[in-house]
């Protein structure tokens, strides 16, 4: 069982949402020491939204009511209550970090599941947001792939569709992932991840738009040079909105 979709299709006894154990490839150091090929980890699954099958990789801040509830998603990012500092280093983003409320699933797992799902059409990405006025925004990309670490977990995306009517990840396509200690910035004198105190796929102009791992606007920042950080924003057909809650999920394109 490699992801939430595998779990649901196998008829596993699962709750509507929650953490479940899946199989992953072991880190190289584990293979070397024990000749162990398969390891396991916990991932957050949503077996209800839009038919289910989703793995949640990132969720941030309180997400109270999200989307149509009909099925399995795998959550890859979640931010709910501000309890987790997302200003983490490269290895933390590689392996994943967080708690039950806020987390990043890990870039290495994103690559593994991307590669695994290529055999049956690949993955789709779904981002759900609540803005500061309580409005829901749901955007999807039909095609999602994260490259291996040697290519800095480059982001590849397919066709966009969504209620925002604006592709907020347009300029992040084909861009490498960056953290403050492994910055892939395009300007020699500016390290983009360190400048925005974040970790994300680098915008070619070093802008923070579309970045859901940036500090929240109400998060206390110790650095006096961080006055330019205003929070997380998302562009919509009505203009730019401040993000109060977010989560990112993936599931196979072949799911149904």
Image (cartoon, helix red, strand yellow):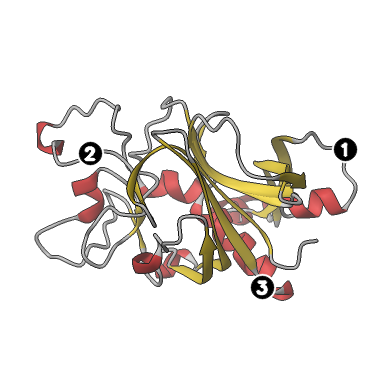
Name the residue tied to disc 2. Answer: 230
Pick the residue in front: 230 or 138: 138
Instruction: Return the x and y of residue 47 as percentages of the image width and height.
Output: 75, 44
Dot 1 or dot 2: first in sequence order is 1
Instruction: Return the x and y of residue 100 as percentages of the image width and height.
Output: 58, 29
Is disc 3 placed on a helix, strand or loop? helix
Instruction: Return the x and y of residue 46 as percentages of the image width and height.
Output: 70, 42
Dot 3 or dot 2: first in sequence order is 3
Dot 3 or dot 1: first in sequence order is 1
Pick the residue in front: 150 or 109: 109
Instruction: Return the x and y of residue 125 as percentages of the image width and height.
Output: 57, 59
Image quarter of residue 117:
bottom right
The residue drawn where x is 51% and y is 55% is 163
Question: Image check: 251 left or right of 108?
Answer: right
Is disc 2 placed on a helix, strand or loop? loop
Name the residue tied to disc 1. Answer: 13
Image quarter of residue 184:
bottom left
Label 1 Cα neighbours within 10 Å, binned few <14 / some 14-19 / many ≥20: few
Q: Is residue 104 visible?
A: no
User: Which label sits in the foreground, 3 or 2?
Assistant: 2
Image quarter of residue 85:
top left
Say above or below: 237 vs 142. above
Q: Which mark is residue 118?
A: 3
Q: Are marks 3 and 2 in contact (CB under 8 Å)?
A: no
């Amino acid at each position: 069982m490699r992801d939430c979709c595998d779990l649901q299709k196998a008829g596993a006894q699962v709750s509507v949402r929650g953490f479940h154990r899946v199989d992953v490839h072991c880190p190289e150091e584990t293979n070397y020491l024990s000749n162990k090929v398969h390891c396991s980890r916990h991932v957050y699954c949503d077996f209800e939204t839009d038919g289910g099958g989703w793995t949640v990789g990132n969720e941030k801040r309180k997400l109270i009511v999200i989307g149509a509830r009909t099925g399995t998603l795998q959550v890859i990012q979640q931010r709910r209550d501000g309890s987790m500092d997302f200003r983490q280093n490269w290895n933390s983003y590689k392996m994943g970090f967080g708690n039950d409320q806020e987390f990043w699933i890990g870039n290495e797992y994103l690559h593994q599941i991307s590669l695994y799902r290529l055999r049956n059409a690949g993955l789709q990405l779904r981002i759900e947001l609540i803005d500061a006025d309580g409005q829901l925004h749901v955007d999807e990309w039909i095609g999602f792939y994260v490259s291996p670490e040697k290519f800095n977990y480059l982001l590849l995306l397919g066709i966009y569709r969504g209620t925002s009517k604006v592709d907020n990840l347009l300029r992040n396509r084909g861009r490498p992932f960056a953290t403050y200690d492994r910055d892939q910035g395009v300007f020699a004198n500016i390290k983009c991840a360190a400048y925005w105190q974040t970790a994300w796929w680098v915008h070619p102009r070093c802008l923070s738009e579309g970045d859901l791992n940036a500090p929240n606007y109400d998060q206390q920042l110790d650095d006096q040079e961080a006055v330019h950080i205003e929070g997380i924003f998302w562009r919509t057909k009505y203009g730019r909105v401040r993000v109060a809650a977010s989560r990112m999920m993936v599931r196979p394109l072949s799911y149904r």
